[in-house]
Image (cartoon, helix red, strand yellow):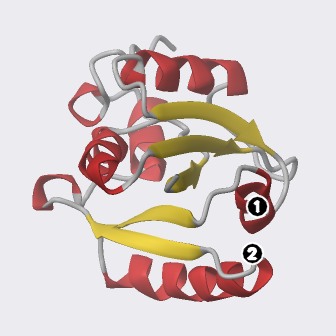
Amino acid sequence: MKIAVFPGSFDPITVGHVDLVRRALPLFDKIIIAIGVNSQKKYLFSLEQRKNWLKDVFNDLGAVEIDVYESLTAKYCEEKNARFILRGLRNAADFDYEKTISQLNHIIGNGVETIFLNSQPQYSHISSTIVREIILGKGDASPFLPAQVKITM
């Protein structure tokens, strides 16, 4: 079974994340969208809220599983028998960063492979960081969020 882990904070999930998962589905038998928990990081939305959004967004896709983990991504992949990590690339800076991480994961994760998908042009400017800034600035972030994600602050 070909299992991929799509790790991230998903704080919040964006339309770019959704597009990436839907495009990657034909490549794998299962994609585990795994919310990484880092005790050193401050999140805008609670873990429960982010998990619920992911479940709502992907509830129609049986091949998608939502989970939470606190270990190294490569170790989590081993626990889940996942041989692949799914990552999206928006630009060259993403590639430079992700390439290094993928090489480390390959070593630590006993050969786990990172599969990169380029963002569609209409999503390449969207990041959770930018969406959080829009939300904190009391702007309308809805064009960047899946319809199931309603922000009330």
Q: Tell me where residue 101 appears, x and y as whole percent.
A: 62, 80
Q: Secondary structure at mark 1?
A: helix
User: Which image quadrant is residue 11 in?
Assistant: top right
Look at mark 1 in the image and give the residue it sits on. 78
Q: Secondary structure at mark 2?
A: loop
> Which of the pair 125/107 is nearer the observer?
107
Name the residue rendered at 27%, 36% in the picture: 144
Badge 1 density bin: few <14, some 14–19, many ≥20, Cα 10 Å: some
Res. 140 in view: no
> Which of the pair 144/101 is nearer the observer?
101
**Does residue 129 lie above or below 131 as drawn?**
below
Distance CA(mark 1)–CA(mark 2)? 7 Å
Q: Tell me where residue 93 appears, x and y as whole percent.
A: 40, 82
Mark 2 belongs to which amino acid?
A: Gly
Residue 13 as seen in the image, left or right of residue 117: right
Name the residue rendered at 42%, 76% in the picture: 94
Look at mark 2 in the image and give the residue it sits on. 109
Res. 78 in view: yes
Please tell me how many numbered marks the rendered image carries. 2
Residue at the extreme front of the image, as rendered: 1
